[in-house]
Image: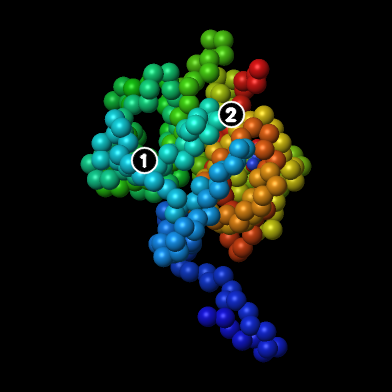
Amino acid sequence: KASKSDDGFCSAPSIIQSDEKTKPIYWKVTNPTLSPSHLQDLPGYTRSVYKRDHALITPESHVYSPLPDWTNTLGAYLITPAMGSHFVMYFAKMKEMSSSGLPPKDIERLVFVVEGAVTLTNTSSSSTKLTVDSYAYLPPNFHHSLDCAESATLVVFERRYQHLGSHTTELTVGSTDKQPLLETPGEVFELRKLLPVSLAYDFNIHIMDFQPGEFLNVKEVHYNQHGLLLLEGQGIYRLGDNWYPVQSGDVIWMAPFVPQWYAALGKTRSRYLLYKDVNRNPL
Ligand SMILES: NC(=O)N[C@@H](O)C(=O)O
Ligand SMILES: [Mn+2]
């Protein structure tokens, strides 16, 4: 309810600091402020946009269906080569007693836990528990299984591995909070990378933090493509000639060369996860 300030102007209620402290990290990805339920009575309205060089895919647009080869898991594909990308990005909603299927031959996989927990088991049958904010990179043709006892939401990236000489990638498991902050000359955001930067890896996952009011200094145009998930916060994303208010849970596809820029707004930090192809000649 708008409050009547003493100078007679109606002011919108300020951003209510709910008991965010008691919520698990990234909880807003699966409980966005503007959630599908808020829009269900508004016929035909969506915040989603799909254009030649970018897309904004918002939670009310997600369409889930059983993931082939996974058990008891629903998947919503957000980005696929049908858009022009060389990777896929999807949400995997794992229910009780669910397990993953293997990617196709020669396809590498990165999973990041947004909610819940899974256990990663691999050929050497050592098993690792992955909780929220943890991730695993599985090299192409690397036998593994992700098993979920209760429930979990993963964001998954997969792509055909692009060999470079005799370099090979390895199973990589970690969590964002244990990655060091990297230098970002000329930029103010905080940057972590989830994968090694060595030439063997043909993509990386950047985790980028902005305090409210901070923004990208470079209005970027580059050959790399992106799949972005806003994990925390809100702000404005410029893509081409469009300016989009975005919130936790939103996903963005950025084609090569799309002009891109972000500014963080609100009272809490923005954090986004960003797929970026690297280390390969664009020719
Ligand atoms: N959009 C965006 O954040 N891009 C940069 O982070 C980058 O490394 O390309
Ligand atoms: Mn970029």
Which comes before the other along the chain, label 2 or label 1?
A: 1
Quick one: SS at disc 1?
A: strand
- Mark 2 is surrounded, within 10 Å at the Cα level, by few (under 14), some (14 to 19) or many (20 or more) other residues, namely some
Residue 75, numbered circle: 1
Q: Nearer the viewer, residue 83 or 118?
A: 83
Position above or below: 218 against 19: above
Position above or below: 41 against 131: below
Residue 117 visible in the snapshot = no
Q: Nearer the viewer, residue 98 or 237?
A: 237
Residue kind at label 1, given as amino acid type? Gly
Find residue 89 and report its horizontal and vertical position in percent: 47, 36
Q: Furthest-front residue in view? A: 44
Q: Nearer the viewer, residue 176 or 160?
A: 160
Label tally:
2
Quarter-of-image position of residue 146:
top left
Find residue 243 and report its horizontal and vertical position in percent: 66, 52
Quarter holding ligand 1: top right
Q: Residue at x 60, y 45 (%)?
A: 208
Q: Residue at x 57, y 14 (%)?
A: 164
* Coloring applied to the structure: rainbow
Residue kind at label 2, given as amino acid type? Asp
- Left or right, 126 with respect to 89, comes to left
Disc 2 marks which residue?
277
